[in-house]
Image: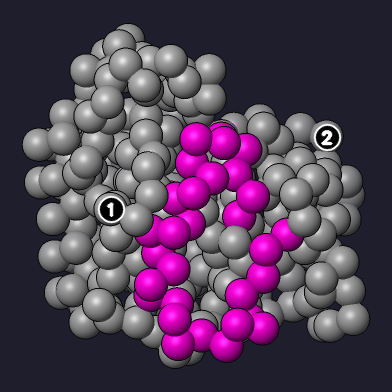
Amino acid sequence: MKTTSTLTIHDEFSPLKTVIIGQGAPYLRDKEKVAAELQEFPLIPNTAWKEQVLALTYPTEEQLVTEYADYVAALEKYGIEVLLADTSAAYSFDYTCPRDIGFVIGDTFFISNMAVQSRADEIQTVMAHLHNIDPNKIVRPPGEAIIEGGDVIVLNDQTVLVGIHQRTNQAGFEFIRDYFENTAIQVLPVYHSQLHLDCCLNPLGMGHMLIHPDSLPGNSDATWQVLKRFNWIEVDAEEREHLATNVLSISPKTIIARKSFSSARVNGLLKELGYTIEEVVFDGVPATGGSFRCASLVLLRQ
């Protein structure tokens, strides 16, 4: 199995070098077990597929396998090293969104404390890729600090945003803030109303930010001042529901985004601004609450 010896994340858009991608299979194979744990499920987007998602009939494993294969092909087209989670290492509902289970800030890998307890062991599916990392650079927050990777956004080497809602609590934010207290990194809380922060906010490489401001109630002036340093590309409620913000930047000017009617307006605006948009059909995971950023645990950017 491939492993990496270097971790470097100082923003969300420098050229992507190494990433762990989720797996389309196995997917919800033990329907009875999943049904018994439905109370742990994320916020399901209010789309045409919601009823089928809750009934555990959509997406299908066959669909997911095809869509993930196309995603991997798009990444490898740009010379990106793609690592895969080992689904035999731990049980989970599914293995589609490794971003949740860990995240990198600078040269440090943080193991998430999952809000969904049935996914708590899922970190084992990616640990084999980290065997060559200095153990002192792998950090697990204390038990009371609930935090997931979709709520952590690295704006630059001086500013990290930590979303606070149902998947990351105040203690999770405070742990990251205190961890970097004696460094040049400022950690800011961002209160939001979505599954994860990256479902309503995502900085891009040419000074823009995909954002749904109505999903960000109750934030301080200090937080808004940081967000307003970017040129906003506002998404509406329907586009947010279809995860138009949840793209993956693979370089400052190149973005992987959904090939979908629901993303067409936003993708068109990005093209007009000079971005190259690599459009991939990716409908299954977004129906359950995640998209390209969620499906990608980024380890190394140039």
Percent across and percent down for residue 292 are 35, 52
Q: In this view, does 243 lie above or below 21?
A: above
Camera-side residue: 11 or 68?
68
**Is residue 235 something that shows in the picture?**
no
Q: For the residue labelled by badge 1, is the local secondary structure a helix, a strand or a loop?
A: loop
Q: In which quadrant will I find the C terminus?
A: bottom left
With 230 as the anchor, is 19 left or right in this view? left
Q: In which quadrant will I find the N terminus?
A: bottom left
With 62 as the anchor, is 33 left or right in this view? right
Disc 1/disc 2 C-alpha distance (Å): 42 Å
Q: How crowded is mark 1: few (under 14 residues within 10 Å), some or many (20 or more)?
A: few
Q: How crowded is mark 2: few (under 14 residues within 10 Å), some or many (20 or more)?
A: few
The residue at 39%/40% (across/down) is 92
**Is residue 173 something that shows in the picture?**
yes
Give the mark, 1 or 2, whose residue is nearer the N terminus: 1
With 65 as the anchor, is 5 left or right in this view? right
The residue at 60%/44% (across/down) is 114
Percent across and percent down for residue 129 are 38, 75
| Residue 34 image-quadrant placement | top left
Percent across and percent down for residue 36 are 43, 15
The magenta stretch is 112-141
Tag 2 residue: 218
Tag 1 residue: 88
Q: Where residue 68 is drawn, which disc sits there?
A: none
Q: What residue type is labelled 2?
A: Gly
| Residue 169 image-quadrant placement | top right
The residue at 83%/34% (across/down) is 218
With 266 as the anchor, is 88 left or right in this view? left
Q: In this view, does 267 lie above or below 138?
A: above
Camera-side residue: 197 or 93?
93
